[in-house]
């Protein structure tokens, strides 16, 4: 056992312990064990940071002599460390949250925690795999884990439908990864990411296949439709799936492709990927605005946010990669927090429908504070890591002269802010809905608050001092991809090198505009603070009421109505129906010709074989 | 190869025996036929290993196929007898064709002169297609699956067919000209099977014929690997056939358990069987994932190599065919898992508490056979055949010898 393999082996050991001790441990005990194991794995992952900062890629065999000459080994570089730290750190917080969240489950907790551990281990293996075959194995292990976890409540139709969609869409697209690596192996005879022979075999077509696989995993339009259906899983699963361990697999794959031949794929595929990312930003957020289910709303925001991350990676510059990877980490923190808050709300109120919520800030003050921090972060409010991530991304796009990307990102940010204003107001402020009357709504338990609060705290910490994350984690990851990037960044994410003047002036203008708006608002006899109307699901507000955050969202829904026809699901359904029709017709023909009259096909084969051997 | 196959067949015999004691698969005659089928299949492997140049192995393997017909016949129903007649037709014709082909080629040790070599290949093509139930001469396999108990079909697919396929693997080593010289025909047969059977599997509503078509689809894959040959194609076919054997025992076993519970055939109209049969449900899911070729199962070890062999031979076109077949197989299995096993159970006399519970012995068998492909998928080298060439191949490295049909040895 080496320090390189330790994070993965700890998780595998924890998996075995979960199975062995299942009979004796309570659900809480299983949760504590899983949390401790993932936290230990997190600490073990942190020990890899110094080597990655020094630019050293640590190699170690994991399954030597696995399959003939092929083995599964690790090559842990800066990019690997970033994903390993993210997966285990976020995983530990989410599992801490799970301890109380899952304590009342009557059955399946061993299955739950065991698969969660393999889920995290799968991400670590993906991130550390020395070659494409190991990465593909991990890719599919992650897929299987998410399938099992989304379908955790397998007796509920909604849960199994969600799991089915996850498996079908991501696996069918995932064959792209398999076909791509097969083509590389057929040409190069090796699959090591860093082998020069692989670089020469890694054509644009192979890159396109990899990108298709990554698009499905990372919910890029139009392969994103599985994610809202996966919301019927236990909330810790949703949190882990959305923040760290599943959707980030595609991000990893795109980033990892930069080590192959110095990122030669980018020349042909960079622009299409950039376009996909931009479309995904807008489609995701516009769909999110129409949601009244809190978890579905967050799911569509995942689509949108992943668009930002992929845009950063698709820019193909050092600053773009830094932005994409920092965004990746930031998103893990704020989206994991938001999902845990949504879970705490559902745990306390029995619903996650915004129309049935309201006024929770008084009953759940801790959860409200944590939510607001994470919501501010996803909206890109200064002092949060979300702001730094967007700031970096816009700087990278401006640096490359891509104003359209900045415009798309800016529109997406505004709509994200509206969407979260709507969600925040309707969940936490106003008067409680009738559905909550008589229900004893309680605050989340201390361990749940600790899990989500710790991540919210990091959102603020890395918002104020992003260099704490940039120097040890992000910069080595960027350098491991072949970009010589020196971090020149100060507090609040303000860059001190190129792009400084443009972005800082831009930021100043925005800040001044906001202050001016506030001044006008105050001078125009702003009404005294009062109750805010709870989102009504679309009905008109009472006469005399003032337009509020809800109405902005509603106006956006009306304005963007044509976008909702961009749902690709009906297209997939048509393909499926056509396929089953063809199969039915084939069966009818086969019954009549092949099954009921055996001598006919035998005669046909005999004639074909005899004719064929003379023709070949 | 035999050092793996013989223990595999013994393990299958033990597992099926335990399962059939817990969930009856037929009367006493079924037991006799089933035991004789496995015994003859094992004897054929032993004979093939001990006397590679004799007809003993071929005769024993053919005897196993004929006895397997008796296993189907022992079902006693009209449908079973009709299926047995179809199977018998296929076995007899296949046996005649393959024997003739083997006679012409001296059991694969020589290449006869034209036109006998062409005739031998044509006969072998027909024989193999009939034996393995490939498209378009698959008529016997779905009929057998519909009319027989689950483990009857499982034994035929996992022992008799696997034995026949391994004979073909040996022939691929000893007489490569049969495959390389006529590759388009073999590839055509394989592609027709893997696409046609995958499509027909999608059209089935009853689970046992669906599994039968899925077997045919998989055989198409494996045949493709065998024909392409080389280290990747042969290893793909080898690991694939092992995964096929283990997977089919699990899949048919799980469906058999569901039939036992329901007291009738299982179709896509059944719902929520995971509630009363959680172990069978989990076993079916694991078996299906292995069959589809999802890592880390043994099925993946075979399938990715078959993809590789496909890429080396047919490039993107063949890869597209393989992808289409894999996609249809995935859709087919996922549909079964989510319609029949997972989800809420529909209240009724047959589902829920009314049916018979899964006997413990059957549950243990299903779990062992479901987990085995995962464990072997993590340690595939344990299943890798010895590196030494087959005795036939060793002899072929000697000087060429004239043969009565005008070819060379």
Image (cartoon, rainbow, N blue to C red):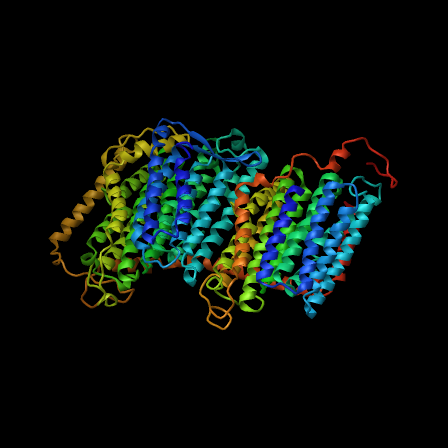
Residue A392, percent from left and from top: 31, 38
Query: Quick check: B60 left or right of B225?
Result: right
Q: Hey, which quadrant is residue A275 in on the image?
A: top left
**Looking at the image, how many numbered discs can be counted on the residues?**
0
In front here: A34 or B292? A34
Q: Hey, which quadrant is residue A400 in on the image?
A: top left
Residue A274 in view (yes/no): no
- Compared with B402, A550 (above or below) is below
Query: Quick check: B10 left or right of A239?
Result: right
- Residue visible at 23% across and 68% down in the picture: A434
In front here: A236 or A599? A236
Residue B122 in view (yes/no): yes
Quadrant of the frame with the N terminus of chain A: top left
- Residue visible at 57% across and 56% down in the picture: B251
Query: Quick check: B408 left or right of A448?
Result: right
In front here: A66 or B203? A66
- Residue visible at 27% across and 57% down in the picture: A345
Quadrant of the frame with the C terminus of chain A: top right
Residue B409, percent from left and from top: 81, 36
Query: Quick check: B21 left or right of A351?
Result: right
Residue A539, percent from left and from top: 28, 67
Residue A334, percent from left and from top: 29, 46
């Amino acid at each position: 056992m080496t320090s390189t393999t330790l994070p993965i082996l700890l998780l595998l050991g924890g998996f075995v312990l979960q199975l062995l001790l299942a009979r004796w441990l309570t659900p809480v005990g299983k949760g504590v064990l899983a949390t401790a194991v993932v936290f230990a794995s997190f600490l073990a992952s942190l020990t890899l940071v110094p080597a990655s900062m020094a630019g050293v890629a640590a190699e170690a065999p994991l399954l030597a002599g696995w399959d003939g000459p092929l083995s599964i080994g690790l090559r842990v570089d800066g990019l690997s460390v970033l994903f390993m730290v993210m997966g285990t750190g976020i995983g530990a917080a989410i599992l801490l949250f799970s301890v109380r969240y899952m304590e009342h489950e009557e059955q399946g907790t061993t299955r739950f925690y065991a698969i969660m551990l393999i889920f995290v281990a799968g991400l670590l293996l993906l991130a550390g795999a020395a070659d494409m075959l190991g990465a593909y194995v991990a890719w599919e292990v992650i897929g299987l884990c998410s399938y099992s976890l989304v379908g955790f409540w397998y007796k509920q139709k909604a849960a199994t439908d969600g799991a089915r969609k996850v498996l079908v869409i991501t696996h069918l697209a995932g064959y792209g990864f398999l076909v791509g690596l097969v083509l590389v192996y057929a040409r190069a005879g090796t699959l090591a990411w860093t082998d020069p022979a692989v670089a020469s075999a890694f054509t644009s077509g192979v890159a396109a296949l990899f990108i298709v696989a990554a698009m499905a995993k990372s919910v890029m339009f139009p392969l994103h439709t599985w994610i809202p259906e996966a919301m019927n899983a236990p909330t810790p699963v949703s949190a882990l799936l959305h923040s760290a361990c599943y959707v980030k697999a595609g991000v990893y794959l795109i980033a990892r492709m930069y080590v192959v031949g110095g990122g030669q794929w980018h020349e042909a595929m960079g622009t299409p990927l950039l376009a996909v990312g931009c479309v995904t930003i807008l489609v995701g957020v516009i769909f999110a605005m129409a949601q009244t289910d809190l978890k579905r709303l967050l799911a569509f925001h995942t689509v949108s946010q992943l668009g930002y991350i992929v845009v950063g990676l698709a820019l193909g510059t050092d600053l773009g990669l830094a932005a994409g990877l920092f965004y990746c980490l930031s998103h893990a923190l704020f989206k994991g927090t938001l999902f845990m808050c949504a879970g705490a709300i559902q745990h306390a109120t029995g619903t996650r429908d915004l129309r049935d919520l309201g006024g929770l800030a008084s009953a759940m003050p801790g959860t409200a504070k944590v939510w607001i921090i994470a919501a501010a972060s996803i909206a890109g409010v200064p002092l949060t890591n979300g702001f730094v991530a967007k700031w970096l991304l816009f700087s990278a796009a401006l640096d490359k002269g891509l104003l359209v990307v900045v415009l798309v990102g800016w529109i997406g940010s505004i709509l994200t802010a509206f969407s979260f204003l709507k969600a925040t107001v309707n969940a936490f402020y106003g008067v409680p809905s009738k559905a909550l009357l008589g229900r004893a709504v309680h605050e989340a338990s201390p361990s749940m608050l600790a899990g989500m609060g710790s991540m919210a705290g990091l959102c603020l910490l890395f918002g104020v001092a992003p260099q704490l994350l940039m120097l040890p984690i992000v910069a080595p990851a960027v350098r491991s991809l072949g970009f010589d990037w020196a971090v020149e960044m100060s507090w609040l994410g303000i860059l001190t090198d190129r792009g400084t003047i443009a972005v800082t002036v831009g930021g100043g203008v925005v800040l001044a505009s906001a202050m001016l708006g506030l001044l006008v608002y105050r001078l125009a006899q702003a009404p005294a603070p009062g109750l805010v109307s709870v989102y009504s699901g679309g009905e008109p507000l009472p006469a005399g009421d003032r337009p509020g955050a809800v109405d902005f969202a509603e106006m956006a829904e009306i304005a963007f109505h044509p976008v909702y026809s961009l749902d690709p699901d009906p297209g997939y359904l048509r393909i499926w129906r056509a396929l089953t029709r063809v199969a039915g017709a084939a069966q009818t023909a086969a019954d009549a010709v092949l099954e009921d009259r055996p001598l006919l096909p035998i005669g046909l084969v005999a004639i074909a074989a005899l004719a064929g051997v003379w023709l070949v | 190869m035999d050092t793996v196959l013989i223990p595999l067949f013994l393990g299958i015999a033990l597992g099926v025996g335990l399962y059939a004691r817990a969930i009856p698969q037929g009367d006493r005659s079924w037991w006799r036929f089933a035991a004789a089928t496995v015994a003859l299949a094992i004897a054929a492997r032993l004979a093939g290993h001990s006397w590679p140049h004799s007809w003993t192995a071929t005769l024993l393997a053919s005897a196993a196929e004929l006895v397997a017909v008796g296993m189907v016949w022992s079902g006693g129903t009209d449908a079973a007898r009709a299926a047995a007649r179809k199977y018998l037709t296929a076995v007899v014709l296949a046996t005649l064709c393959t024997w003739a082909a083997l006679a012409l080629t001296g059991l694969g040790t020589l290449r006869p002169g034209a036109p006998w070599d062409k005739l031998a290949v044509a006969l072998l093509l027909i024989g193999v297609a009939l034996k393995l139930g490939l498209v378009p001469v698959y008529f016997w396999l779905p009929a057998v699956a519909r009319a027989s108990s689950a483990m009857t079909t499982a034994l035929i697919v996992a022992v008799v067919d696997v034995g026949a396929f391994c004979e073909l693997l040996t022939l691929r080593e000893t007489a490569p000209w049969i495959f390389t010289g006529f590759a388009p025909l073999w590839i055509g047969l394989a592609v027709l099977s893997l696409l046609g059977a995958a499509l027909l599997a999608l059209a089935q509503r009853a689970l046992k014929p669906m599994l039968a078509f899925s077997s045919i689809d998989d055989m198409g894959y494996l045949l493709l690997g065998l024909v392409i040959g080389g280290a990747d194609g042969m290893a793909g076919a080898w690991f694939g056939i092992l995964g096929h054997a283990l997977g089919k025992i699990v899949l048919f076993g799980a469906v058999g358990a569901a039939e036992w519970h329901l007291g009738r055939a299982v179709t896509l109209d059944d719902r929520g069987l995971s509630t009363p049969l959680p172990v069978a449900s989990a076993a079916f899911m694991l078996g299906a994932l292995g069959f589809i070729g999802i890592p880390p199962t043994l099925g993946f070890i075979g399938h990715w190599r078959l993809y590789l062999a496909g890429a080396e031979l047919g490039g993107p076109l063949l890869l597209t065919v393989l992808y289409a077949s894999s996609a249809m197989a995935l859709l087919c299995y996922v549909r079964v898992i989510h319609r029949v096993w997972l989800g809420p159970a529909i209240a009724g006399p047959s589902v829920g508490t009314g049916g018979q519970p899964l006997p413990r012995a059957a549950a243990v068998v299903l779990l062992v056979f479901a987990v085995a492909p995962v464990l072997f998928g993590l340690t595939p080298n344990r299943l890798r055949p010895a590196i030494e060439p087959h005795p036939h191949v060793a002899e072929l490295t000697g000087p060429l010898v004239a043969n009565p049909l005008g070819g060379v040895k």
